[in-house]
């Protein structure tokens, strides 16, 4: 291959990459390519070899991400058109793919909505059988989100079989044990089974590269974005329900029965799939929300935890480890871990340590101290009064959080001192996260027969 052929191959490769950017249309990409070709020709005239001229010209153009954002700002109306669900592009193949995605989403959302109503065909009643629905909401709804993700990733048959088997196992675990309505094991299964099944959804998400730590971190991002979208949909749904009830009441019709039995449960189930599809469809159009919220709430949670520790030291009062308090502290520690994960996902891996990294270190260390206090109290209660399902679950979860937070604090300290690369921190989190999935399955499968009807 001569120099000119090699240069044309480089232009083709660069142009293919540029045209995959959703922020840039065909004419924009052509304009950039013309600019690049002009720059290369000028550099060749100055005496550079074609391959050298190409690299210099690309470097002078700056970051492609920056150029994409510049085009998006200049053509702001295009951004809004991309956000519209029925928007069309100049590329017919892209439109066809978007329509297939939309149809797949609609089918899966309808499937999730109908699955929630299906138990009523066999005599179940949402008002009378609240325990049944609390246990089975995950097995009824989450398989449809997993199906959508597996379809988008073109998952192979073996992985689909594993995902299906795990969902079946979750459904069996939810119904095989005869748990009393007031038992602790019932509440623990209702909490931990959706968590365990969410990690099964994660298998579908990473189906295109199961072994990649980067894809596992992408699933962490997906989880945060999905939560934000779902909350927004729920808020909009609440407004819809309010207007529906008010307007029909104004004409003497009471729609509350329809709203309570159909609109709310079916809408909540279908929104699980819709939120996931929105994250997938719009993640390249708008800035991710979860990392932005992380930057806002990390300092606030750091101050709150430090204030709690100071107050705990001044008052010298112990921590109440009753059920509600255990759930509160575990949620607090999980939120801290979530803040850490999303800040990792948004951080430039090549950037040097900065003030925000040190702030995160303070947050993690504060959470670590709180976790130690909770563990001491839980262990003391177990030693004095014996083990219950709640205490056993809290003990295991706090041990897992302790291990994660302790090593994360060590890695953040090394990062702040410039002795540990950022990649070590990211690798640690993506490696340790599956441990939480294993623990959730242990609670679901082992605790009910171990503790009986407690």
Image (cartoon, rainbow, N blue to C red):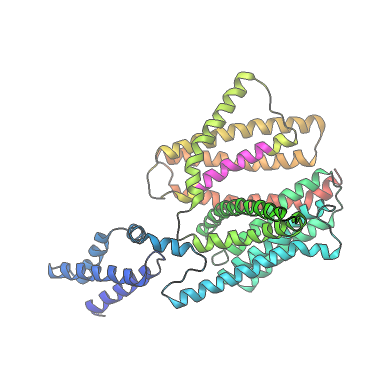
- 20 left or right, relative to 135: left
Question: Is residue 341 covered in magenta?
Answer: yes
Q: Is residue 212 above or below residue 443?
A: below
**Left or right side of 431 for 349:** left
How many numbered dots are placed on residues in this image?
0
Q: Position of residue 234 (x, y in %)?
A: 62, 52
Q: Which quarter of the rendering shows the N terminus?
A: bottom left
Residue 383 can be seen, yes or no: yes
State the image quarter where residue 366 is shown: top right
Instruction: Give the image location of residue 148, x and y in percent.
Output: 61, 67
Is residue 211 visible to the viewer in this orientation of the structure? no
Whether residue 66 is situated above or below residue 16 in the rendered picture? above
Q: Is residue 241 magenta?
A: no
Front residue of this view, candidates 153 and 241: 241
Where is residue 20 shown, x and y percent of the image?
40, 69
Q: Which residues are magenta?
A: 328-342
Q: Main secondary structure of the magenta part?
A: helix
Instruction: Find the residue positioned furthest to the front.
Output: 251
Q: Residue at x 37, y 44 (%)?
A: 352
Is the C terminus in the top left, top right, bottom left or bottom right quadrant? top right
Residue 389 in the image: above or below residue 204: above
Q: Residue at x 50, y 45 (%)?
A: 293
**Between 247 and 36, which is closer to the camera in this rendering?**
247
State the image quarter where residue 305 is shown: top right
């Amino acid at each position: 291959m001569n120099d000119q052929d090699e240069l044309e191959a480089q232009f083709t490769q660069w142009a293919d990459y540029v045209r995959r950017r959703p922020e840039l249309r065909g004419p924009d990409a052509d304009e950039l390519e013309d600019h690049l070709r002009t720059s290369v020709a000028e550099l060749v005239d100055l005496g550079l070899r074609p391959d050298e001229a190409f690299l210099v010209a690309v470097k002078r153009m700056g970051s492609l991400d920056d150029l994409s954002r510049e085009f998006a700002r200049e053509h702001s109306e295009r951004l809004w058109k991309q956000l519209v669900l029925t928007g069309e592009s100049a590329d017919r193949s892209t439109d066809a793919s978007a329509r297939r995605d939309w149809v797949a989403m609609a089918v899966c959302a309808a499937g999730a909505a109908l699955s929630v109503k299906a138990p009523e065909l066999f005599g179940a009643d949402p008002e009378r059988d609240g325990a049944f629905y609390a246990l089975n909401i995950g097995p009824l709804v989450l398989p449809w989100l997993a199906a959508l993700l597996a379809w988008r990733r073109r998952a192979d048959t073996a992985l689909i079989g594993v995902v299906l088997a795990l969902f079946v196992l979750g459904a069996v675990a939810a119904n095989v044990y005869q748990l009393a309505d007031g038992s602790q094991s019932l509440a623990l299964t209702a909490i931990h089974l959706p968590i365990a099944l969410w990690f099964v959804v994660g298998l579908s998400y990473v189906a295109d590269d199961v072994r990649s730590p980067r894809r596992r971190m992408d699933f962490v991002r997906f989880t945060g974005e999905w939560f934000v979208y779902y909350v927004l949909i729920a808020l909009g749904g609440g407004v819809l329900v309010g207007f529906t009830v008010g307007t029909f009441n104004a004409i003497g019709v009471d729609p509350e029965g329809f709203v309570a039995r159909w609109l709310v449960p079916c809408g909540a189930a279908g929104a699980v799939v819709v939120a996931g599809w929105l994250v997938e469809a719009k993640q390249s159009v708008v800035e991710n929300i979860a990392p932005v919220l992380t930057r806002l709430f990390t300092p606030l949670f750091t101050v709150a935890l430090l204030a709690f520790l100071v107050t705990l030291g001044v008052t010298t009062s112990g921590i109440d480890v009753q059920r509600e308090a255990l759930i509160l502290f575990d949620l607090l520690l999980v939120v801290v871990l979530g803040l850490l994960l999303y800040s990792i996902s948004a951080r430039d891996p090549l950037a040097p340590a900065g003030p925000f990294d040190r702030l995160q270190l303070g947050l993690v260390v504060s959470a670590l101290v709180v976790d130690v206090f909770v563990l001491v109290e839980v262990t003391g209660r177990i030693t004095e009064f014996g083990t219950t399902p709640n205490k056993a679950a809290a003990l295991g979860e706090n041990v897992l959080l302790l291990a994660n937070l302790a090593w994360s604090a060590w890695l953040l300290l090394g990062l702040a001192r410039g002795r540990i690369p950022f990649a070590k921190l990211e690798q640690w989190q993506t490696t340790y996260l599956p441990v939480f999935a294993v623990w959730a399955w242990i609670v679901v499968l082992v605790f009910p027969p171990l503790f009986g009807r407690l």
